[in-house]
Amino acid sequence: MIRYRKDSNSKLEPVTDEMYNSWLSSAYSPVGEFLIDIDKYVGTYENTSTTNWVFKAKTLDLLNVEFKCQIKCVMEFNRFTNWEVTTSHMDSFPELDRETLGKIIWENSLKQFKYDITNIIPPSYEWKGEKAKAYKLERLSEEGRSNYGEVDDRYTKEINNVLLAYSYFNYLAYPISRKDVYSLILNPEIYRTHKKYIDNRGVRLDEKANSKIRSAISRVPKDIWTRTQGRQGGEVTQLAMDILDDYFKFVTEDKNSRNLRKESIKVGN
């Protein structure tokens, strides 16, 4: 159960679709706190026939323990963050790390109130999306040069790599696995409803398809993305930021997308 309240004097209430949709205007950064109760260990696989969250290899009955986990947190730009975690019998589940907890939270959010994890990335950042296609086709046209100035031809050649790098960094900033990140970038649509998420389990776990994203990421030029050690794996360069600035002079964004872009996009570790 995921509950929310605006302040400590308010009553905690289960998050609903209506609540979540109302947070769009704040770029999914509502004032207040969340309390997330996890009273069963759900592992990392779902039972696709009943859509219930199930144990991966253990059950609490067999272990004869009462597992509980409560997380107090806030939501910033569609991310559950600033966790304060209280648990009992956590030592019975050593594999229940922060990454796994993060996945449990967003999977249950998707089930409870149609949480859309892809809202972490502003729509304009969609890798190979329509806006990127328009930029590539029109930016170097006579009209594009006249309206937005002269730029190097490489700006349009590298825009997909720049958007890919930014998407990769921002999804990895959320506590989910790289496999999930690859699938999110490749198939964002199937993460937007619980039914699509369950029905497309095979697509999400398709190693061959996800390897295409992994390969594309590995081919991002070094002068776009400087590799470093650590979870996020590097940082974008000044060239990438210049290309992105030019891109956003060209594309049209709505207010909420601008809010997300301005505050939530990270450029390094």
Image (tube, rainbow, N blue to C red):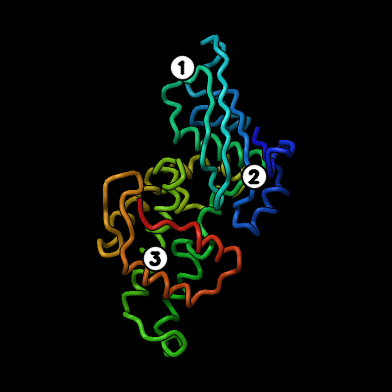
Q: Residues within 10 Å of mark 3 (few under 14, many from 20)?
A: many
Secondary structure beneath disc 2? Answer: loop
Sequence-first tag of 1 and 2:
2
Residue contact between numbered discs 2 and 3, judged by CB atoms under 8 Å: no
Query: Residue 5: x percent and y percent?
Result: 69, 41
Foreground disc of the pair 1, 2: 2
Query: Residue 111: x percent and y percent?
Result: 63, 39
Q: Calculate the distance from the C-alpha at mark 3 to the C-alpha at mark 1.
A: 44 Å
- Position of 46 with respect to 268 (left or right) is right
| Image quarter of the N terminus | top right
Asked if one can make out residue 112 in the rendered structure from this viewpoint, the answer is yes
- Taking the spot 40% from the left edge, 43% from the top edge, the residue there is 179
- Position of 2 with respect to 42 (left or right) is right
Residue position marked by numbered label 1 in the rendering: 92
The residue nearer to you, when weighing 165 against 68, is 68
Foreground disc of the pair 3, 1: 1
Residue position marked by numbered label 2 in the rendering: 32
- Position of 251 with respect to 29 (left or right) is left
Q: Amino acid at mark 3?
A: Asn
Foreground disc of the pair 2, 3: 2
Mark linked to residue 160:
3
Q: Amino acid at mark 1?
A: Ser
